[in-house]
Every structure is written in structure tokens, then in C-alpha cells.
Image (cartoon, rainbow, N blue to C red):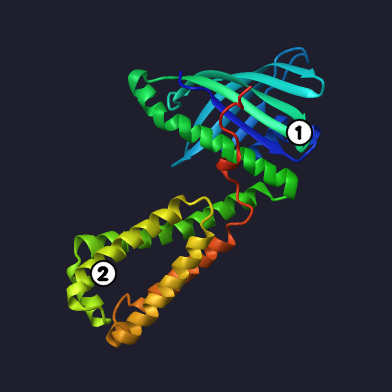
């Protein structure tokens, strides 16, 4: 097994509200992106462990299913802990079995919601190699879901709406980043002759054309990468909008025949402005895995 997955998030909500949102299956499904179905199984007596079924849809009509059970709960000075173990006989599942806990710790700012869990993989060496990618993704999904739950309990942001807003934000932001990367790499670095000619037609001296295009390529690649990785992309979105419209106006004014050409700069600039506006507007109240602690605090 690799390093256990640890996630912690302070949520400004009473412990009972957090307990209900995480221990009630149909409520749990709403905020946890790792699962699309959670269902408790009947118990013959309250003293028996609570068993449950879980499933995750992975697309193309396929799903991965598994089982689990609560193996104990404890409460001390208002601090609650719920332990569980889980397993899957589904051959599509990388996870064979695992265990972990959820902890609810009252704090001055609300409730510290904490989980730590680990698991074993199938598929031998191939499974262990695949887990080098899967484990960080699963940890990210856990943290993203915890912050999504926080937005729901603190601000009333419906989990379905926050997911939709996240998709809209990343479609706009990711497409804009791709455009800048493409224009920086393909026409300017891989086939710069056309860009050098365009630069000279817009007023750049011929002897400075190659250096100008190369510098522009580096800048556009940096802007594209920044849009994809920046924690707060809003300044870059504003910069992108200004550059897209500015370049469209300058190019259209200096090389007017391009205005009537296919895929001409005016429509490209307007489209990039629209993508930036969508990404900017949808930025607010987005769940972010980076808002969670991913390692146990030093004692």
C-alpha cells in the first residue's frame, strides 16, 4: 500500500449537520464525487455493523461496485469518530480492500472534518504502477468533495450547482488556455514564417520579426499554462481578454483584408473574450481541493 490518503477541512457548521450529511446515504451521494450510489443494507439488530453498498459510474454504461461496513463509532468530549472498512469483488476495481475513519472534531470555527484511509490494489505490479496515478486522483477527489460539502453547509450552495459551475468554469478556462498554447506553439514556434510575415505587415521591422515572434510565442505559452494552473486565474483572464481584443483590433486595422478572411481575428478575439467572461463569472464559490489539508498537522 502507498501513503494513506489524508484530508482535513474546517467547516463552519454544527457537528450534527455534518454527521447527517456524511452518515445518511442519500445525502452523502449529493456531495461526494467519488460515489454515485450508496445504500445501507438492513440489519437484524442495531448492535450489528452497518453494511452498505457503493457504486461509481465510470462512463459508457459501466460502473464499479463494492461493499463496506461500519466497524465502530466512538465519542469523547464531543469528538466523534466513525471507522469503516470496504472491499470490492468487481474485477474492474483497482481497489480490493481498505479501511479508514471519519472524524468530527469541534473547533472554534466550526467542526474539523477529517478522514484518513488506505487500501490494497489488484492486478499485481501493474496495479501498483497504476496506483501511482490513481491514488493522487482519489485524494484530490476526496478533498474536492470535502470543500464542496463545506460550500453546501456554510453557504447553501447546492452540490449539483457547484458541479455544474465547476464544469462550466473549466470548459471556458481550459479552452482559453488551449488556444493560447496552440497559437504560441504551432504557428509561432513550429511554422513561424507566416507569423513573421504578419508581424512585418503590422509594422514590426523585418530584422526584428523572428525575435518578436519567438518572444510572443514564449509569452503566449506562459499565459496558456498560467490559465491552466493558476490558483486564482482572474488576473490572467482579464489579461487574456485585453490581449485578444487588442490583437484583433490592431491586426484588423493594419491588415484589413484579414477581417474578411476565414477564421479572422475579430471573431476569434470576441470568442476568447466570451470564454474569459464565462470562466471569470463561474469562478466564485467553486470547490477547491487546495482548500483542504492533505497531510496530518505536526504534533
Q: Which residue carries the number 2 mark?
A: 212
Residue lying at 75% horizontally and 17% vertically, measured from the top left: 74
Q: Quadrant location of residue 19?
A: top right
Tell me: 105 left or right of 90: right
Q: Position of residue 103 (x, y in %)?
A: 69, 25
**Quadrant position of the C terminus in the picture:** top right
Residue lying at 46% horizontally and 18% vertically, measured from the top left: 1
Q: Nearer the viewer, residue 279 or 291?
A: 291
Q: Position of residue 76 (x, y in %)?
A: 79, 18
Q: Is residue 229 above or below residue 144?
A: below
Residue lying at 37% horizontally and 20% vertically, measured from the top left: 123
Q: Which residue carries the number 1 mark?
A: 20
Of helix, strand and loop, which one carries label 1? Answer: helix
* Res. 172 visible in picture: yes
* Res. 271 visible in picture: no
Residue lying at 45% horizontally and 50% vertically, measured from the top left: 229
Of badges 1 and 2, the one in the foreground is: 2
Q: Quadrant location of residue 258?
A: bottom left
Q: Position of residue 108 (x, y in %)?
A: 79, 35
Numbered mark located on residue 216 in the image: none
Of helix, strand and loop, which one carries label 2? Answer: helix
**Distance of mark 1 from mark 2, alpha carbons?**
60 Å
Question: Is disc 1 in contact with disc 2, using a CB cutoff of under 8 Å?
Answer: no
Total labels: the figure holds: 2
> Which mark sits nearer the N-terminus, 1 or 2?
1
Q: Residue furthest right?
A: 77
Q: Position of residue 201 (x, y in %)?
A: 23, 82
Q: Is residue 229 above or below residue 26?
A: below
Amino acid at each position: 500500500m502507498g501513503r494513506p490518503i489524508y484530508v482535513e477541512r474546517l467547516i463552519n457548521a454544527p457537528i450534527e449537520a455534518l454527521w447527517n450529511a456524511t452518515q445518511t446515504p442519500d445525502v452523502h451521494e449529493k456531495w461526494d464525487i467519488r460515489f454515485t450510489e450508496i445504500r445501507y443494507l438492513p440489519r437484524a439488530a442495531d448492535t450489528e455493523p452497518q453494511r452498505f453498498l457503493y457504486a461509481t459510474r465510470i462512463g459508457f454504461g459501466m460502473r464499479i461496485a463494492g461493499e463496506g461496513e461500519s466497524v465502530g463509532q466512538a465519542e469523547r468530549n464531543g469528538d466523534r469518530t466513525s471507522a469503516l472498512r470496504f472491499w470490492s469483488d468487481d474485477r474492474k476495481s483497482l481497489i480490493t480492500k481498505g479501511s479508514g475513519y471519519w472524524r468530527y472534531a469541534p473547533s472554534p470555527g466550526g467542526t474539523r472534518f477529517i478522514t484518513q484511509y488506505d487500501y490494497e490494489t489488484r492486478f499485481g505490479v501493474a496495479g501498483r504502477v497504476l496506483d501511482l496515478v490513481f491514488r493522487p486522483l482519489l485524494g484530490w477527489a476526496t478533498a474536492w468533495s470535502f470543500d464542496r460539502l463545506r460550500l453546501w453547509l456554510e453557504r447553501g450552495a447546492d452540490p449539483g450547482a457547484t458541479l455544474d459551475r465547476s464544469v462550466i468554469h473549466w470548459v471556458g478556462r481550459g479552452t482559453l488556455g488551449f488556444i493560447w498554447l496552440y497559437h504560441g506553439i504551432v504557428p509561432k514556434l513550429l511554422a513561424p514564417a507566416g507569423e513573421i510575415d504578419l508581424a512585418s505587415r503590422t509594422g514590426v521591422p523585418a530584422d526584428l520579426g523572428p525575435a518578436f515572434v519567438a518572444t510572443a510565442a514564449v509569452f503566449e505559452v506562459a499565459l496558456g499554462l498560467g490559465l491552466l494552473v493558476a490558483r486564482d486565474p482572474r488576473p490572467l483572464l482579464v489579461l487574456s481578454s485585453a490581449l485578444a481584443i487588442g490583437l484583433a483590433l490592431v491586426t484588423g486595422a493594419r491588415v484589413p483584408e484579414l477581417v474578411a478572411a476565414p477564421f479572422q481575428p475579430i471573431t476569434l478575439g470576441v470568442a476568447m473574450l466570451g470564454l474569459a467572461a464565462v470562466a471569470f463569472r463561474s469562478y466564485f464559490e467553486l470547490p477547491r481541493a487546495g482548500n483542504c489539508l492533505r497531510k496530518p498537522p505536526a504534533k
